[in-house]
Image (tube, rainbow, N blue to C red):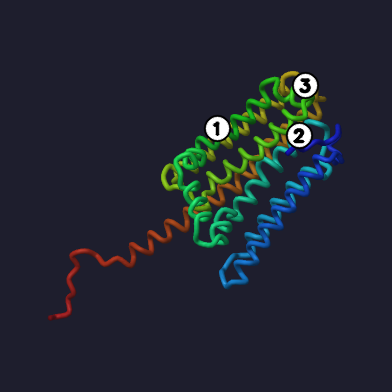
Amino acid sequence: MTFAHGPHGQAATGPWAFLVGAAALLVVAAYLTAAARLRARGDVWPRHRDAAFASGGAVLVWAATGPLPGGPFTAHTALHLLTGMTAPLLLVLARPLTLVLRGLSPGRGRRGLLAVAHSRPAALLVFPPVAALLDLGGLWLLHHTPLFAVAQHRPLLHAAVQVHLVAAGLLFAFAVCRLDPVRRGGGGLAVRGVTLLAAGTAHAVLAKSLYADGPPGTAFAPVDLHAGARLMYYGGDLVELALALVLAVQWYASTGRAWTRGRSRPVRGSVLQDGT
């Protein structure tokens, strides 16, 4: 997967761009088909999840083929926000793993997928601090080493970098939201909240550092560099705010259930005073 845009963010017209766009559309079509089959057999599957997944796919298609704003660095930052933050959040909100599990018939395939989801390696990958390190660590490595400059002249390396950014963004959104069934443990609300706060801080510091100086080996115009850094800073805040909202809803739901259980539990040692 690679996303290549021209010097001023205009749409790329190479075969890779259209291949990525077509792949995203096919995945969205597969999701919507699976959701329709669930409803046809009488299962409930909220349509807002369809909308979230379709929107995530549309973001990827736009990132691959549509025009991006500003100069080269601003376009790069917009690409990062679209493919590494916005699209992953939308796709994760659609609960794709849950959909696949509910669509599979009981058997070896479903048991195998559940075994993978509940395995120790999967639990390690979706442990929020690990997911944040893979995501933010990759961004810092890209922007504060010669990797950025070198990747611009090596298509395969550039493609590998883009794949990592998308995959790491998906992993981080999955680890923070934790909406699909995975192995329990290590991903409580407190851990996820603190990790999100730390990751947001690291992302903001990265944006500020790029405002002062671009990636090593590059020579972006100051206006372009500053615009891209501001976009990274404020755009990242918006996506992180959306992630925080997901956590807030989960906290509200969990505390509400606990409060309801506490209200319905009889007080130990109470005595009925009815005169008998």
Determine whether 182 is above or below 198 in the image: below
Q: Earlier in the sequence, mark 3 or mark 2?
A: 2
Q: Secondary structure at mark 2?
A: helix
Determine whether 17 is above or below 47 in the image: above
* Left or right of 111, for residue 209: right
Asked whether disc 3 touches disc 2, contact meaning CB atoms under 8 Å apart, the reply is no
Q: Which residue is at 74% across, 26% downward?
A: 151
Image quarter of residue 223: top right
- Residue occupied by mark 3: 218
* Left or right of 109, for residue 70: right
Q: Residues within 10 Å of mark 2 (few under 14, many from 20)?
A: many
Q: Earlier in the sequence, mark 3 or mark 1?
A: 1
Determine whether 161 is above or below 32 in the image: above
Q: Position of residue 163 (x, y in %)?
A: 68, 37
Q: Position of residue 84 (x, y in %)?
A: 67, 40
State how far apart marks 2 and 1 are (Cα): 21 Å
Residue type of the residue flagged with mark 1: Leu
Name the mark on residue 142. none
- Residue occupied by mark 2: 76
Q: Which residue is at 67% across, 62% downward?
A: 33
In the image shown, does 177 or 197 lie closer to the viewer? 177
Quadrant holding the N terminus:
top right
Asked whether disc 3 touches disc 1, contact meaning CB atoms under 8 Å apart, the reply is no
Name the mark on residue 133. 1
Q: Position of residue 167 (x, y in %)?
A: 63, 40
Q: Residues within 10 Å of mark 1 (few under 14, many from 20)?
A: some
Q: Secondary structure at mark 3?
A: loop
The single residue placed furthest to the front in the displayed view is: 108
